[in-house]
Image (cartoon, rainbow, N blue to C red):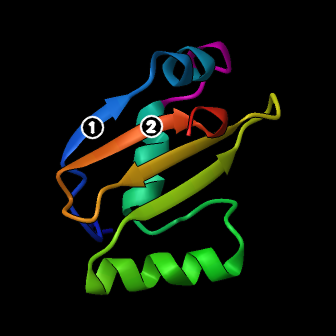
Amino acid sequence: MKPMFPLGQILATPRALETLQQLRRSAQSFLIRHVLGDWGDLVEEDKKQNDLAVDMGGRILSEYNLPDGSRLYMITEADRSATIILLADEY
């Protein structure tokens, strides 16, 4: 599979990385899902907005529900300069 867009610089909050480590999950696995267009647990309207953002330019957001009940966000900036990994309550 081919990446749908560039991720730019990859950044992550310490809490997001700590949570993933505690849950024995890899940030890389979620980045792969994000860049391949698996937007995770977003509602359909937001998924469609991401599809448009890939084609037209715009911020891209993915949301993944984690086993502990927290939610992980991946946000790629509209200019594709950076992607940040953070927990929903850090947004």
Q: Secondary structure at mark 2?
A: strand
Q: Main secondary structure of the magenta part?
A: loop
Quarter occupied by residue 24? top right
Quarter occupied by residue 12? top left
Quarter occupied by residue 78? bottom left
Instruction: Report x, y in % for residue 67.
Output: 79, 33
Q: Is residue 55 above or below residue 25?
A: below
Residue, disc 1? 10
Q: Whole-Å distance between the Cαs marked 2 and 1?
A: 8 Å
Q: Amino acid at mark 2?
A: Ile
Q: Is residue 68 above or below residue 46?
A: above
Which residue is drawn at the image coordinates 65% and 82% (left, top)? 45
Q: Secondary structure at mark 1?
A: strand
Residues marked 2 and 1 touching at CB (< 8 Å): yes
Q: Which mark is residue 85?
A: 2
Q: Amino acid at mark 1?
A: Ile
Q: Is residue 80 above or below residue 65?
A: below
Instruction: Report x, y in % for residue 55.
Output: 29, 85
Please state the extent of the stretch shown in magenta in the rendering: 21-26
Quarter of the picture containing the N terminus is bottom left
